[in-house]
Amino acid sequence: MSHSRTVEIEGHIIDSGTMQRCFGAVMDLGGSFDVEQFDVGTHEEAESYCRMAVSADDAETLQAILHELHQNGAMLENPTDVDLVSAPADKVVPPNFYSTTNHPTEVLYDGEWIDVERIEMDCALVVEPHGAPDGGPRAYTKVLNAVEEGDLIATDQSGIRVRPPERPRSGGGAFGFMQGGVSAERPSNSTIREVAAELREVKAAGGNVMVVAGPAVIHSGAGDALADLVAAGYVDALSVGNGFATHDLERSLYGTSLGMDVETLEHPRKGHKHHIWTISEIIRAGGIEAAVEDGIIGEGVMYQCVKNDVDTVLAGSIRDDGPLPDTITDAVAAQNAIRDQAHEADIVLMLATLLHSVAVGNCLPSTTKTVCVDINPATVTQLLDRGSAQAVGMVTDIGTFVPTLAEFVLDADEPIDESVESAGASGE
Amino acid sequence: MSHSRTVEIEGHIIDSGTMQRCFGAVMDLGGSFDVEQFDVGTHEEAESYCRMAVSADDAETLQAILHELHQNGAMLENPTDVDLVSAPADKVVPPNFYSTTNHPTEVLYDGEWIDVERIEMDCALVVEPHGAPDGGPRAYTKVLNAVEEGDLIATDQSGIRVRPPERPRSGGGAFGFMQGGVSAERPSNSTIREVAAELREVKAAGGNVMVVAGPAVIHSGAGDALADLVAAGYVDALSVGNGFATHDLERSLYGTSLGMDVETLEHPRKGHKHHIWTISEIIRAGGIEAAVEDGIIGEGVMYQCVKNDVDTVLAGSIRDDGPLPDTITDAVAAQNAIRDQAHEADIVLMLATLLHSVAVGNCLPSTTKTVCVDINPATVTQLLDRGSAQAVGMVTDIGTFVPTLAEFVLDADEPIDESVESAGASGE
Amino acid sequence: MSHSRTVEIEGHIIDSGTMQRCFGAVMDLGGSFDVEQFDVGTHEEAESYCRMAVSADDAETLQAILHELHQNGAMLENPTDVDLVSAPADKVVPPNFYSTTNHPTEVLYDGEWIDVERIEMDCALVVEPHGAPDGGPRAYTKVLNAVEEGDLIATDQSGIRVRPPERPRSGGGAFGFMQGGVSAERPSNSTIREVAAELREVKAAGGNVMVVAGPAVIHSGAGDALADLVAAGYVDALSVGNGFATHDLERSLYGTSLGMDVETLEHPRKGHKHHIWTISEIIRAGGIEAAVEDGIIGEGVMYQCVKNDVDTVLAGSIRDDGPLPDTITDAVAAQNAIRDQAHEADIVLMLATLLHSVAVGNCLPSTTKTVCVDINPATVTQLLDRGSAQAVGMVTDIGTFVPTLAEFVLDADEPIDESVESAGASGE
Amino acid sequence: MSHSRTVEIEGHIIDSGTMQRCFGAVMDLGGSFDVEQFDVGTHEEAESYCRMAVSADDAETLQAILHELHQNGAMLENPTDVDLVSAPADKVVPPNFYSTTNHPTEVLYDGEWIDVERIEMDCALVVEPHGAPDGGPRAYTKVLNAVEEGDLIATDQSGIRVRPPERPRSGGGAFGFMQGGVSAERPSNSTIREVAAELREVKAAGGNVMVVAGPAVIHSGAGDALADLVAAGYVDALSVGNGFATHDLERSLYGTSLGMDVETLEHPRKGHKHHIWTISEIIRAGGIEAAVEDGIIGEGVMYQCVKNDVDTVLAGSIRDDGPLPDTITDAVAAQNAIRDQAHEADIVLMLATLLHSVAVGNCLPSTTKTVCVDINPATVTQLLDRGSAQAVGMVTDIGTFVPTLAEFVLDADEPIDESVESAGASGE
């Protein structure tokens, strides 16, 4: 094997599965490794270090192997500065540009490692040599459609270091470490209780809670419980679609969702008349906020979001009726709005929506806590498959999950701290 | 079309869909109909009547059509006595024997219509000319393997009349009429509230509640809630498998289910050591009742069933570990035990088990109320597909369903009636 | 019951289930009916007629009942002209505007029944008094966001008649009539064979075939088979998203889809580098058509669509990477493009995409044949739930479905007719 | 931490994930480790070695940790002979008996390591001091219900060593290593092609192929293809239930399965008359073999199994109709029959049945190759979750899978070798 490079890997690389993935990648891709040094951390808190030469029969295979190792945190021995090439035109990146992961990343620029800001996967990595407030270099991600001519774009992977999440030293409870699979065999209420505790903790620490929700939250009768959480100050950002908002507003206007009375189950008829009438009423009023101010809308999730100044994004989709005037119909503009929410979030609850959850997940660094809830196991598995450091997935009924969560969050014996309480109080 | 017969159909045959199915069957099977008389019920309470000639090109097709019409309640004009043939040997029925439906059925014997007892589908129909207490005729179903030489078995379908369920005159709330499909888009807690009300009503009327439950009830942490319902007297019969019982007993013995602490979620390890140890402990004790009496088992669903004299059947299966000494390992014997439970039940709750629910469903007349709960929509659809007159299906999480149901049933403001309360009290 | 109206219903209203639904609606909604006349069609081809008075305790309930009956094809006795009100502003409809169904519809204008064009559900119904070529009236649907100030919008439902699909007189084979549920228990290859025959028939009759496809078609290795169908002239319109196109183009560029070699299964690594690189290559080329012309893309579905002038719509979504320059990012603009495709289609194949299938389904009249294929039963059920007159749903693996379909369509012994063959040969 | 023990682990323990699981178990369970020696294999073929002291605050926790480490292949330093205790009664094991894993296992007896025979999980481990042909010791597993008074049963885990599967040195193609999750996003036909190649390879090497199949194989129209595989000698053992056999026999007798003509899709009526009639015909004939000999059954899977002397087990279940006389109705007897099949198998195909697949999987050592195919992802995930060394899971449609597999197996250009061909020929 005539092509060879030496890489270094360090950290909790055995118990986090890093070495398993690195050795596996070399073998899967037909290469070979020669471990030159391996210092095993002798106890839980001690980190390990591995230096190994990796070789392959041809340059392309070696490159593929190094790409995999890089994504798992390996770094070339004696790294050199990041290789920057100017973008030839707006939205056009240089060939062989570096496509980001969702893990914390640093670039070596001018001999110094600098943190990459706005971590997000599948982006270009831009370096501004004098972009920092102090005139020093600054590095951040940019989605392809935001790239501008002349941006200095990282290519290849030399001079770039990623830090995949490591296994927490103590158990994460319901929040598993990089769990790709989801078991339906966990005690549901215990898991919900842990999620509730986490929510209270995040808020007590002044953190930001983002909720992504699909229309099933309303159909399944969980709207009131979610509205209660909003009213109590537990939701900082709401990321939904035109459908969620319309169903919620329909309930306020007509007491129905898709024609069914959500309290009494009566009149469960086909026919979306109320649905489309709701949209026309909001158009007539000039938007949701106007409808709330006019007193047309007097309850529900959207109402509480207006009243509590929750940062709300209605992202459009091709299946929308209407849409409501508040809906951002351009996908790129909607992504940008979602991106701003996602980058602020400390914990994200993804409730019964695949489309919006994937959109949000695409913008999240792997360090953000996530809770994914859906009745469809395939949805939960797909959402957890992002390598999040702390994620909990539940295959459960959103119509019982949200009320139970709200009960556990809101009925806790004592307030988490005063700031939350006053926020909740002032928000009423 | 040279072959023709005339049939009559009566009842709420339009709004129950009977005529739609009858006309459809004739057309699907390539026949032809000629409506000779059709009296439409002019208001909700009035029944309709249809007499039509059905014809086909050949006798076999006509026979197939008449079979379909018969199953939908049609009867040949001028019916003759049921055609009985003696069973030639044990377990052997005459050729062309009549295979029962799960609907109320009558046979014309000696010029009189008599009700068929122990309604169950896919059975033989036996008439005992002098089987009734008064020495008159008696008719009942028999499964094939119970047929004895000389039994008088109905053949063909002449002289037999079935009564498929009719649409209730007033809305059934969550309990739908012959709903083959299941929507995940119904308000969960409202539906559970309706089921709770129905349970309380059945018990208040002195009815019999049968619960069929799978191991997921325990894994998902819903065991305590089910045990509470048993303790309060809301469960008359429990039909489960070796797996359910073992997981429940494991919780009592070790506080785990399949190795996971269901309260704290801690130690979620692989390895069924506790599972198989539980079985060996119960074998050592000589069975579940002995283990309860010895104080080895002090809580849980099985404990409450022993303490409250609940009629409990543990039906074996080829995937069982052990099994526990209480398990009926022979499938035919287990079916017979399940059959006895099913025939007593006024309402059946099917909780997160396909195998046992199908086994029970096979024995149920279409008039028994059923509630089917599973996280898998395909399971719920399959269970509701029996043409039950009153059934509710929920695609939900059993781990939140049972606790919510128990809360709604047990926390109702006032007791349904005294007998239930005292039953609950005495059962402790 | 002091409020009452008389309605008429005619057609194959018993075997199509219309009367069952109408009687049911009255009872469910708490009303009462009095059948004044009922003429039953005495044989398969004869239509039935029903006239009944419907009454309710209050005007609102009566209105709700009449709405349901209307949607099932009932018409008020002695109908009056459609009630038109001018739209007060762009996108704003009059209160109580008539929201359309997806069934064929007529309006009574100036004493004449005129057909409504561009049938689509949840739209406003616009009448142009002199919009027809001959200066006569014209009626058509408009989505809310296309309504312009001054449009004459139908309100209420008087003077409007809908024609729900009726049960075909002869069996539809795999194409069921309004089948809300889907069985996984049908013989797969036989069903695919029927779909293939239908496709060939539609093309032989000069019809238009629309394919809606999700990325799983490519991941699952079915891209080649779909490309073959396009090359052979069996696809007139392709409605997909940015994801489908990118995965297909990635295969052409790198032989992978999401990093996996679809032929050899080798290198199934995480990491979307090829995915995002593909997008940047197409951006660089200036779009898909340019990339095909430049020889960058030399195979696959998109390649064949360019080469065969297939009407292709790439509708954007918030989960898109990139997106490709060909993607319509505005949801309303994308809907309009999809709408134009849908209104042309004689048969629509919905392949493994919920989002795009719902978007297309929203624009389809109930008379268009549809085939819905997905591995998830809930997706198929949801897509079939539109009351389509002829629909087939299959819960199957798209990765085996498309190759088998292509084999059955393309390997048929003889050409359906010459026009199809020459269309295929000429590369249209 | 006052309680401590030293363990050793060796093998491909990094890339197989063993060390990750071991370190993780210690941390999850609240213990602590101190690595005393760690020799890393420097290249792909070199094994690693780890010796570490494990400590915990109390004896019980240490025991739980050691149990986990043991199951992952760790061994106490300086192991002592296995601890044997006599079974006090039939079916009763000593307290703290050792419950087996499904991995290759050895026991240290009289200072010598001996292999445990009939590897199967959740069993007791019996040692016969003079059970070997040469008068030496013999060790094997016994299910609880087979334990006899006086059997020498292993307790605790000292003197027992398990060998969990290690990652194959070269890629396994579709056959993944301990893959707990299943992706629906793999190219279907490529995966089926790999399974076909594996089947041919196993047969060419004289291996044993076991097929476990559910009734959906027949409903979905795949019966002919499976019958073809049997006829060509590719199936050595068939493990099914009463339902599979009945549906297959019904096809031969009436051309229907559950009332639907599987070729033409015609007459898809409800009503199991043919189903129950089939059972009565076979009862009348005296069993399947008799029915084949009498010429009553002339085609299908069961027919080919009789004609080709395939080892066939019909295991009963509580949902069975009938059952057929060939069905083993006792669950324990049926398990024993399945166990004998499973222990002979070199590769097992699990086709669309959860119940029978779990039953078979319970008896399989982790070294047996398995292929799990089901339309329900949860089923596939559950079946793959046994830690099999080589397993492939497919979420696909059994109705297209089996015909495609048969095509790939049977239409291969040349025979794998002569023995297979002649086997196939002689089997006709």
Image (tube, coloured by chain):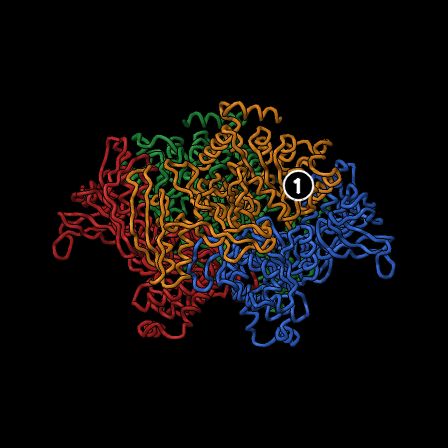
Chain colours: A orange, B green, C blue, D red
Q: Where is residue A165 in the image (x, y as percent from the top left)?
A: 42, 43
Q: For residue A234, which quarter of the picture?
A: top right
In this rendering, does residue C309 appear at all?
A: yes
Number of numbered markers: 1
Q: For residue B91, which quarter of the picture?
A: bottom left
Quadrant position of the C terminus of chain B in the picture: top left
User: Looking at the picture, which amino acid does disc 1 mark?
Assistant: Thr
Quadrant position of the N terminus of chain B in the picture: bottom right
Decide which of D418, A67 is in the foreground and name it.
A67
For the point 66% across and 52% down, which residue is it?
C362
Q: Position of residue A124 (x, y in %)?
A: 53, 50
D236 displayed left or right of A275:
left
B220 displayed left or right of C115:
left
Q: Mark 1 points at which residue?
A: A246
B301 displayed left or right of A382:
left
Q: Position of residue D230 (x, y in %)?
A: 38, 67
In this rendering, does residue D324 appear at all?
A: no
Decide which of B315, A229 is in the foreground and name it.
A229
Q: In this view, does A217 lie above or below C417?
A: above
Q: In this view, does C196 lie above or below C132?
A: below
Q: Position of residue B215 (x, y in %)?
A: 41, 42
Identify the subunit bearing mark 1.
A
User: Looking at this rendering, what residue extends furthest in the left direction?
Assistant: D135
Disc 1: CA contacts within 10 A as few (<14), some (14-19) or many (>=20): many
Secondary structure at numbered mark 1: helix
